[in-house]
Amino acid sequence: MRADVAASNQELLGLMAMSLATNANRPPFDSRKASQQVQLVDVLQFIATKGQISLPLKLAVLISAWDTVEKPANLQPKNPDLFLTREWPLLDQYLRANPESFLSKVYGVSALGGTEEELLEGLNKVPPQDRVKLAEGSASSRDLTRPLRWLLGLQ
């Protein structure tokens, strides 16, 4: 998931509301047009009910483009857990409601350190290892291996 992409399909909701108001035929459901969080929860439900895995399954939730969240004008929560709760509520609620199936940790990740424009404007002069950032709760580091080490039980 990306911090700079909305989690819902407002444009699809508008079309559905318009079809109800005008008594027009509703567009047929197309799972490919469902919001990303609906698709993720659907996949997680299949894993939990049909997967041949031992539960609970560790799940690292990575929110990319985290540098966009940390910009001063951005009013989104600066804590990845709170970001997930506010911006991806369906996924957050599903994970919280199913602790017997999923043990999750949420991370904010910025691998580039900025947008493509910012890279062209001079950010690319900063070494990549100094641009990366990983946010976990209220703490941050440059260690992008933390989620993998947590998944493997090495922390």
Image (cartoon, rainbow, N blue to C red):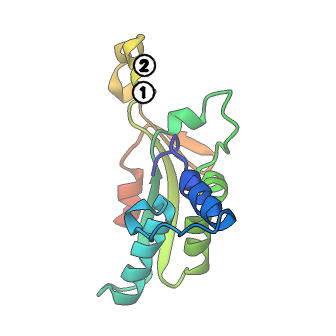
Is residue 119 in view from this perspective? Answer: yes
Please give the residue where the numbered disc 2 appears in the rendered image.
Answer: 117
Give left or right: position of 75 versus 12.
right
**Quarter assignment of residue 14:** bottom right
Give left or right: position of 139 versus 131.
right
Residue at image point 46% right, 59% down: 36
**Quick one: 79 or 43, which is closer to the camera?**
43
Amino acid marked by disc 1: Arg
* Quadrant holding the C terminus: bottom left
Residue at image point 37% right, 80% down: 47
- The Cα–Cα distance between marks 1 and 2, rounded to whole angstroms, is 15 Å
**63 above or below 21?**
above
Amino acid marked by disc 2: Glu
Please give the residue where the numbered disc 1 appears in the rendered image.
Answer: 131
User: Residue 104 location, x and y as percent?
Assistant: 50, 67
User: Residue 93 location, x and y as percent?
Assistant: 62, 71
Residue at image point 57% right, 57% down: 15
**Quarter assignment of residue 18:** bottom right
**91 above or below 7?**
below
